[in-house]
Amino acid sequence: MLRSQSNQLERLQTENRRLQASLAKTGPNPEAQAVDSESAQRETAIAKMNDAKLLVLGQLLYANDNTQQVARSLDQLEPYLRDKTPSLTATNQFELVFQGSFQDIRNPTQTIVLREKQGWQASDGSWHRAYGFADGHSELHRAADGNFETWEKQHMFSPTPTGQ
């Protein structure tokens, strides 16, 4: 699983470099500003998802070295991300929402490990937030009203009750 994610990381790094180069350009044409704005939003969303995926990869690598325990802070992931090029884009801020062992997670494809601290509003008025999941993938979730609570509750870790 880690080998596959390392291969995915290289693809993400290439895409991230392309996105960073694209974000560095500014369009002088006023008529193209609306298209550029939409394109910039899309590129920012992809960068946020790439950051989430990179952080989850760091969490998986950390856990691999620490009896499947996740890091208690994002700072602990720094040694696992240090040599990754490009590094995080700094387009967002994340927080860890799972503490414990990856072994305790019954459904890693549906369990959030980290999330963007704040959602952000798109030009269409909808709200978005980036998430990293226990299996290593990332998602951008959309909420029309900016309330992510119900969806998050369905995807947060809940321990198995004792005796089951």
Image (cartoon, rainbow, N blue to C red):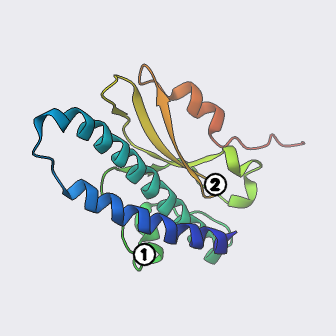
Q: Secondary structure at mark 2?
A: loop
Which residue appears at 30% of the width and 52% of the height? 91
Specify whether 6 is left or right of 20: right
Residue 88 visible, this orientation: no
The number of numbered badges drawn on the structure is 2
Specify whether 135 is left or right of 77: right
Residue 64 tag number = none
Extreme-bottom residue of the structure: 83
Q: Do the CB atoms of the residues marked 1 and 2 lie less than 8 Å apart?
A: no
Q: Secondary structure at mark 1?
A: loop
Q: Earlier in the sequence, mark 1 or mark 2?
A: 1
Look at mark 1 in the image and give the residue it sits on.
84
Which residue appears at 50% of the width and 67% of the height? 11
Q: Residue 130: image x %, image y %?
A: 46, 44
For the N terminus, the quadrant is: bottom right
Q: Nearer the viewer, residue 96 or 26?
A: 26
Q: Residue 155: image x %, image y %?
A: 63, 38
Picture quadrant where residue 81 is located: bottom left
Which residue appears at 36% of the width and 38% of the height? 118
Q: Label 1 to label 2, Cα distance in Å?
A: 20 Å
Look at mark 2 in the image and give the residue it sits on.
134
Q: Amino acid at mark 1?
A: Lys
Which residue appears at 54% of the width and 60% of the height? 56
Extreme-right residue of the structure: 164
Specify whether 48 is left or right of 100: left
84 up-or-down from 164: above or below: below
Q: Nearer the viewer, residue 128 or 149?
A: 128
101 up-or-down from 128: above or below: below
Q: Residue 116: image x %, image y %?
A: 42, 45
Q: For mark 1, does the 10 Å Cα neighbourhood hold few (<14), some (14 to 19), or many (20 or more) residues?
A: some
